[in-house]
Image (cartoon, rainbow, N blue to C red):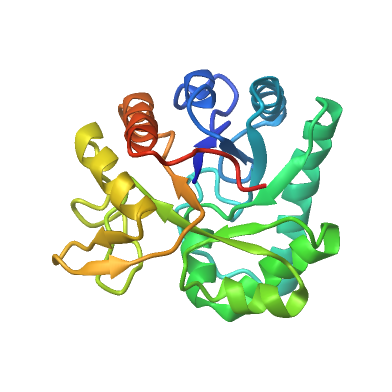
């Protein structure tokens, strides 16, 4: 199982999360590209630190929404969205290569992530951007996302992902952040769920057992206690005999 986290989400003098501590725990780093968070210096430092630790680098592309942290759904024309995704991917990959590495995958962030799971128009825009840059770069998305079918047509690989610290609906989607209990904060609870997810199932908010087959697991880097949660998840997975390694 791959363990990924959203990193590099500071901006200027504003810092969010403990990137260095999380980079010692995860196997893949979703690096903010500057549209929802991140700036050139933060991107460079995050990429350099990831490379130093042997952590895979992913470009976490998003809507152009610094004020809303990329969590506000937006109506963007497909051509514009595709160009903005391409811009973000190329920027982070360029920085990563200058540091001695390279972007190994792409993961949409926040509202864009959720939108492309159900919207084939915006999903196509994102996948076309990835395909135009490098069709070998995998895209992270939910197991039943619309992204899988579109990416298959365009020859772009996908990787199914689960979220250790997010609540699920009975249909297998994430509970919207605006709803109470959408984000889980107890390290012990999250760790137990992580082991269950790695073994193929998760319990929804209404008690239903949902079968999931995933290759990567996300723990968020911007929540209070993120490092303790990520460490608990890693320890629980290893304790259950689950090997942790990047999917790339």
Q: Where is residue 135 in the image (x, y as percent from the top left)?
A: 80, 62
The answer to whether any part of residue 175 appears in the image is no
Q: From the viewer's perspective, is 229 left or right of 245?
A: left
Expressed as whole percent of the image width and height from the top left, the position of residue 25 reads 48, 26
Q: Position of residue 125 (x, y in %)?
A: 69, 71
| Residue farthest toward the front in the current orientation of the protein | 241
Frontmost residue, 163 versus 42 = 163
Q: Residue at x 62, y 69 (%)?
A: 76
> Percent position (x, y) of residue 73?
47, 63
Quick check: 196 left or right of 151? left
Residue 189 in sight: yes
In this picture, residue 186 sits left or right of residue 19: left
Q: Residue at left 65%, top 37%? A: 56
Q: In this view, does 157 lie above or below 222?
A: below
Residue 219 lies in quadrant: top left
Image side of residue 6 versus residue 155, left or right: left
Figure label count: 0
* As drawn, 219 above or below 153: above
State whether residue 173 is above or below residue 119: above
């Amino acid at each position: 199982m791959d363990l990924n986290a959203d990193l590099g989400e500071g901006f200027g003098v504003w810092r969010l999360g403990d990137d260095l501590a999380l980079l010692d725990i995860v196997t893949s780093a979703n690096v903010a590209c500057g549209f929802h968070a991140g700036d050139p210096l933060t991107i460079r430092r995050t990429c350099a630190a990831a490379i130093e630790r042997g952590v895979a680098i992913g470009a976490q592309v998003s809507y152009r929404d610094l004020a809303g942290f990329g969590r506000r759904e937006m109506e963007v024309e497909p051509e514009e969205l595709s160009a903005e995704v391409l811009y973000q991917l190329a920027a982070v990959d360029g920085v990563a290569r200058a540091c001695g590495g390279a972007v190994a995958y792409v993961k949409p962030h926040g509202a864009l992530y959720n939108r492309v799971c159900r919207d084939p128009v915006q999903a196509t825009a994102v996948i076309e951007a990835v395909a135009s840059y490098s069709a070998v770069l995998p895209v992270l998305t939910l197991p039943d996302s619309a992204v899988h079918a579109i990416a298959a047509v365009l020859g772009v690989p996908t990787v199914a992902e689960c979220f250790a610290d997010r609540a699920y609906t009975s249909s297998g989607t994430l509970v919207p952040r605006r709803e109470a209990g959408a984000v889980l904060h107890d390290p012990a609870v999250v760790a137990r769920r992580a082991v269950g997810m790695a073994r193929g199932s998760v319990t929804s908010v209404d008690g239903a057992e949902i079968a999931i087959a995933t290759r990567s697991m996300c723990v968020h880097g911007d929540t209070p206690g993120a490092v303790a949660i990520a460490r608990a998840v890693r320890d629980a997975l290893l304790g259950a005999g689950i090997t942790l390694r990047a999917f790339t």
